[in-house]
Amino acid sequence: MKKSLIAFALTGAAATPAFAQSSVTLYGLIDTGLTYVNNNTNSSGRGVGAVWAMQSGVVQGSRWGLKGSEDLGGGTKVIFQLENGFDVNSGKLGQAGREFGRQAYIGLANDTYGTLTLGRQYDPVADNAQATTFNGQWGALFSHPSDIDNTDNGFRVNNSLKYVSPSFNGLRAEGFYAFGGQAGQFGRDSTIGAGLNYAAGPLYLGAGYFFAKTPREQFSDGNFTTNAPGTPPGVSTTGAFGFVGTPSSMQVISAGGTYSFGPVLVGANWSNARFENAGAGTIESVAGNTATFDTAELWGQYKLTPAATLGLGYSFTWGKVDATDKQPKWGQLNAIADYSLSKRTDVYVMGVYQHAIHTNADIYDGNPGTQSSTRNQVLARIGIRHKF
């Protein structure tokens, strides 16, 4: 009887078809710490002093995810990624409560023809230019004011189709389009973009562009928040940019580069963010009014030991807001000291000082404080990060 069962099992195994090679990886990251902001205002604009708060996902957003692939043969494979964001201090979902708000896509990758993916994805600015910014290296609190140019990927893009070419001697190109999905208004809530990057040894160059229609409707999970009438619903929930209306479009161009030599890495970035039909003091668009913001940034980091890294950066942002005839400016100094306890765990101390002109200081909206009641604002943080 036992011999019969063994023979049956062997026969069944021989008849089983050979499946293509596939893999699925579960991964994640937890980042939390204590953040201090020295000067804040209440809803009426009056100073209320300092704020201390536990804050999740600063150097990198706290997350867990699944990514995988299936080899189809001939150099082609199916790829997918599902990535969830969460607040480690409260357990709440991130990205306005989305289950997989950070990324959710599937596609095909081919060694010769490139990669085509569909789903909720990063735009070409985040893909190609973010690595040339200090916040691209060390997180959200070093973003350009309120992440006005999305170089810190404060939002992702739904319903998007992305193509990334194979590398041609270090050069890659990207094309991007997001479908609006509005009946009778095919272009509404749509986004179009493109990017390039070049990597050769110690040199990296990257540039990205995107144009998004009705950004407040598209990007409700990021810096565009749907607030009640009477509160600023625009780019910055504090209204620090001098306009609080609903722009009809958002255009961002960003370019920069990094270069490493020995223990040193240096980087530079420039970006331009442009908002059309931006109102002031109203939730409506105002035809003809434009708001533009340029940012120039220079930064560097030094590996003091294999475990210890020091970083320092400075960015300057200048704007012009037609609706208010204001020309606000922000200078921001960023610093970090990071120490690796192991390959997966590090601790860090970081600080930000911002000085504003023709407006009040307002370090990135992701911080636990609010707009300063003065031209200056200081932030400090100590944190720990673990990758798994």
Image (cartoon, grey):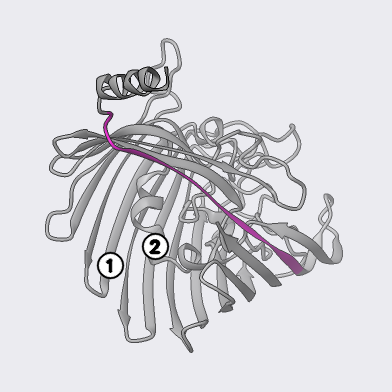
Mark 1 and mark 2 residues within 8 Å of each other at the beta carbon: yes
Question: Is 324 on the left or on the right of 183, as rendered?
Answer: right
Residue 284 pos. (x, y %): 61, 31
Residue 27 lies in the magenta stretch: yes
Q: Callout 2 environment at 10 Å: few (<14), some (14 to 19), or many (20+)?
A: many
First in residue order: circle 1 vs circle 2:
2
**Callout 2 secondary element:** helix
Give me the disc on residue 119: none
Task: Name the residue located 49 percent from the left edge and 50 percent from the top edge.
Answer: 153
Res. 105 image quadrant: top left
Identify the amino acid type marked 1. Tyr
User: Main SS of the magenta segment?
Assistant: strand
Res. 185 image quadrant: top left
Figure label count: 2
Residue receiving disc 1: 204
Q: Return the residue nearer the eye: 311 or 304.
A: 304
Task: Name the residue located 25 percent from the left edge and 72 percent from the top edge.
Answer: 203
Is any atom of residue 378 visible in this view? no
Stretch of the chain drawn in magenta: 19-36
Q: Return the residue nearer the eye: 387 or 199.
A: 387
Residue receiving disc 2: 131
Residue 57 lies in the magenta stretch: no
Task: Name the residue located 84 percent from the left edge and 51 percent from the top edge.
Answer: 44
Is any atom of residue 176 visible in this view? yes
**Callout 1 secondary element:** strand
- Measured Cα–Cα span from mark 1 to mark 2: 9 Å
- Give the quadrant of the N terminus: top left
Residue 328 pos. (x, y %): 57, 62
Residue 199 pos. (x, y %): 23, 64
Identify the amino acid type marked 2. Ala
Residue 66 pos. (x, y %): 48, 41
